[in-house]
Image (cartoon, rainbow, N blue to C red):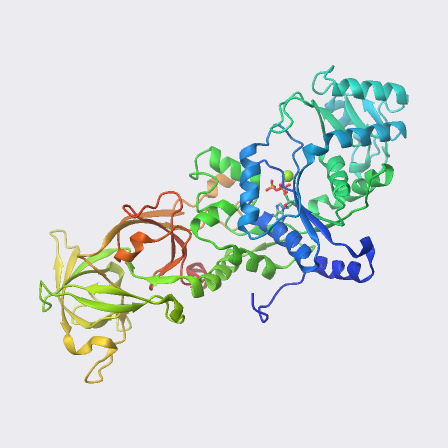
Amino acid sequence: MNNDTPTAGNFIRNMIAQDVASNKHDGRVYTRFPPEPNGYLHIGHAKSICLNFGLAQQYNGNCNLRFDDTNPEKESEEYMRSIQEDVSWLGFNWTELHYASDYFEALYQFALELIDKKLAYVDSLSADQMREYRGTLTEAGKSSPHRDRPVAENRDLFKRMKNGEFADGEHALRARIDMSSPNLNMRDPVLYRIRHVEHYRTGNKWCIYPMYDYTHCLSDALEHITHSLCTLEFEDHRPLYDWVLDNVSAPSRPEQTEFSRLNLQYTVLSKRKLIQLVEQGHVSGWDDPRMPTISGIRRRGYTPAAVRDFCERIGVTKKNSTVDMSLLENSLREDLNPIARRAMAVLKPLKLVITNYPKDKSEKLTARNHPKDESFGTRELRLTRELYVDHDDFMEDPPRKFFRLGPGREVRLRYGYCITCNEVIKDDAGNVIELHCTYDPETGGGQTPDGRKVKGIIHWVSADDAVDAEIRLYDRLFNVENPLQGDDYIEHLNPESLTVISNAKLEPSLAEANTETPYQFERVGFFTPDSVDHTSDAPVFNRTVTLRDSWAKQKNR
Ligand code: ATP
Ligand code: MG
């Protein structure tokens, strides 16, 4: 990112700068990114990744990747692997890789410590009873009859919970804090529950699993994290985070700070919702290029630099807000423009015959691969008598300001001659199927000998050399700004989010395109070969982003 890019504030960066200056945490900066492996990462996670890894980089600190894997029902190896791939793709290296499940034994020992201090007890109320006893925001809770169990009995029961002697839900370990606390999270929260479920890493070794609030702070402490950054919904959990650390012999004292989640218009950023789209078949998978997942946008052709730039621009605040999708797309266009090779592709082919160009003749024209950067070099395009141009570049009855083809109108072929349209060929139904034009041999090399003005330049592909391709055009996944407002977000799926063009015509060099190499199809948009389906025999390109923000234009109309 260049220095004059306007950036939103980042209060956490300022806070850390002060902490470093005052030598808090011995001047160390140690952060972590702690995803639960219960789905693929999305752009919201990218905000957290850029924040945590970015701060560590900036202050010469460390950042761990930690899987918060304490819910065996929903987690899997596949998700765990995809998360590592996505973090790496974004350009970050973790200092250490950890799994909360590696701490199960240590967490168990801390729980015994709480029991010995009379700060935890085994409760035998059912989940429903516990809820009933908890009280409400306006009403204090009441104590469980098991709250004052003797230490020895708690120890014994907890050990037997661990040994699998009880069924799911029969007992739970609870912290003994304050049943009348105004903060419901402090009313003797559950620390451990019994779940006879196989875990993707620990198998059947454990049948008691620690709760998030208990696990998270201790995992942070075990890794000597200094700044534990999380989203705002955990603000009310911070007293519990601190309580646990204050009451066990934790090896270090991390501090939690909350920031607002990223919400993006026209999409949903929640693994739970995204899973539904995948499982119900509304998209082709987690990496469907319409998905706001990291794997989806990668397949679509997004670059890591664009995502990082976007995260820098949105800043970090305590205020929840929804960001316009066009901001993300602008970061992408800015990143792609200097790095995308130019090429010509015709999405809606219309045959054009240059009637005064000899059948057996062809010419090699030199085209620049990038208009501004000479290091991209040049390539040769063959001009032949028969070409394809885009249907949208012709109008039978064009308005005056349409600087493209129409009967009697003259335009320049990109890198080539000026041509004039003389005849429009139609099929029986009256559809235009071919244009007959003549070229002016004096207009090569960008010249017009008599100084006449030819405003329009159109792109084209030689009909002799053209390679057939499939092009996938993507639009917003949802057709309302906030799909989650209302009863069922599925109803707001945009039925036109994918348009497949099966008969596009490409200049031949594009058949050799590598996946992940971005192109700008001149005058059309940015395109990237599909990483799954593209082959040189059957090219498939994804539209990564349009050249301009067409939605903004529509809104202003
Ligand atoms: P989801 O609701 O999508 O499942 P989550 O918060 O449950 O998200 P985690 O795997 O627990 O997902 O998230 C890992 C980290 O990423 C957490 O620190 C979380 O706060 C952060 N995070 C998740 N979603 C967002 C978001 N939209 N904006 C910023 N940070 C996010
Ligand atoms: Mg979660």
Quadrant of ligand 1: it is top right
Could you say which quadrant of the image residue 80 lies in? top right
Relative vertical location of residue 438 with respect to residue 108 in this rendering, above or below: below
Relative vertical location of residue 536 with respect to residue 418 in this rendering, above or below: above
Q: Quadrant of the C terminus?
A: bottom left
Name the residue: 53% across, 40% down. Answer: 82
Q: Nearer the viewer, residue 119 or 156?
A: 156
In x, y percent, where is residue 418?
Answer: 20, 73
Name the residue: 64% across, 53% down. Answer: 53
In x, y percent, where is residue 187?
Answer: 82, 34
Query: Does residue 49 appear left or right of residue 190 in this picture?
Result: left
Could you say which quadrant of the image residue 7 lies in? bottom right
Asked whether the viewer can see residue 133, the reply is no
> Which residue appears farthest toward the bottom when viewing the image?
450
In x, y percent, where is residue 22?
Answer: 83, 61
Q: Quadrant of the N terminus?
A: bottom right
In x, y percent, where is residue 492?
Answer: 47, 43
Q: Nearer the viewer, residue 471 or 110?
A: 110
Asked whether the viewer can see residue 203, the reply is yes
Could you say which quadrant of the image residue 56 lies in? bottom right
Q: How many numbered circles does the render carry?
A: 0
Query: Does residue 251 appear left or right of residue 419 in this picture?
Result: right
